[in-house]
Image (cartoon, coloured by chain):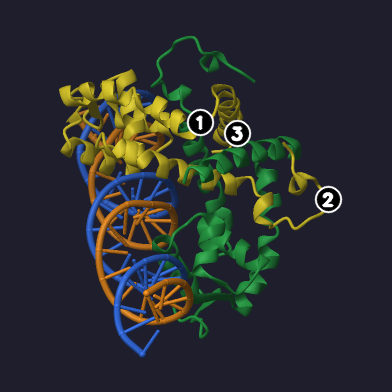
Chain colours: A green, B yellow, C orange, D blue
Amino acid sequence: MVVAEDRLEGGDPLDLDRQVCFPLYAASNMLNRLYRPILGDLGLTYPQYLTMLVLWKDAPQTVRSIGDMLHLDSGTLTPLLKRMEQSGLISRTRDLDDERRVLIDLTAKGRELRSDAEKVPAILSAELGIDEASIAHLRSQVRDLVAVLKAHA
Amino acid sequence: MVVAEDRLEGGDPLDLDRQVCFPLYAASNMLNRLYRPILGDLGLTYPQYLTMLVLWKDAPQTVRSIGDMLHLDSGTLTPLLKRMEQSGLISRTRDLDDERRVLIDLTAKGRELRSDAEKVPAILSAELGIDEASIAHLRSQVRDLVAVLKAHA
DNA sequence: ATGGGGTATATTGTGCACAATCTATATATG
DNA sequence: CATATATAGATTGTGCACAATATACCCCAT
């Protein structure tokens, strides 16, 4: 669907509706708001949920490898992981083979949380009522943008 | 472009690559990182830049109307606007007709900044090297999602 | 006019997100 | 072996983003 503002008809380049970045920024905030109550029931924030997704796929992992997956640095992850350690979902231990590294592993409680978390995507798509096809399409669009952005990082 | 993970072949629903929200979250962070040095030259952060876009289009405005445009609440905007007042770009004055309201207006310095800001979109698209057509396509995709999200806010 | 209900903004507290900087450790190179 | 260089995390400081709450104010119906 292409609306008037999308056409290159010499409008104001600073019009909010002509920015790519703004809808992306707004959508990211709105999704976060939508996730918040659902994840709150599990005792997680959205970045913490993403961290759990990474760990459920493969654990233990270093702080660095988690950051590579999520495109986050240690300044963000260190305090986040300490909070998750406090809430008993993960453990943080120095790697004895390379003492610069900290290994993040799941606790029993962290592993158990997975069965509850598996319901989250379904709850969300039900709440939004978007069909799976348009979700897949949007996802590949945004993923292409991420690929371009990654190249210019 | 549809890749393997997009097909509904019964994979793990918690796989990071199957989430819509994650690429969106990552793209939003990455765009913010990309904007930061460019806007830093103008003395702005990204949300402050968005606020200026709103004000350049129409000023003065209330905190509320700015928040409606950007989907942000007063808890976010109040301190942000105070910082912008400190840096001399805007003024904050109680509306005498309705003392609940605060009117945000541009200062001369704020209006002058516009000519520099007009270069920002060109700098950015040059830096990314994405053609205008795919940007327009992506924009309408994300905007559709925002419309859906807005309906469920 | 007055009291009740809704509105506009501010405040407080928590949790990201990132740049800049620091410390400790590992590894390569002479 | 010694030292230079690079790497892994942690720390500090700034600025969002939001929920929950507080405060002041407008307006309407009695």
Looking at the image, residue B136 sits to the left or right of residue B80; the answer is right
Where B147 falls versus A48 (above or below)?
A: above
Residue at image location 41% in from the left, 33% down from the top: B70
Spot occupied by residue A22 in the image (x, y as percentages of width and height): 46, 32
Between B129 and B146, the one lying in front of the other is B129
Which SS class for mark 3?
helix
Outermost residue on the top side: it is A9
Between A17 and B115, the one lying in front of the other is B115
Q: Label 2 amino acid? A: Glu
Looking at the image, residue A133 sits to the left or right of residue A64; the answer is right
First in residue order: circle 1 vs circle 2: 2
| Real-space CA distance between mark 1 and mark 3, rounded to the nearest whole angstrom | 25 Å
Crowding at mark 1 (Cα within 10 Å: few <14, some 14-19, many 20+): few
Which chain is disc 1 placed on? B
Mark 1 = which residue? B129
First in residue order: circle 1 vs circle 3: 1
Mark 3 = which residue? B145
**Same chain, marks 1 and 3?**
yes
Which SS class for mark 2?
loop
Which chain is disc 2 placed on? B
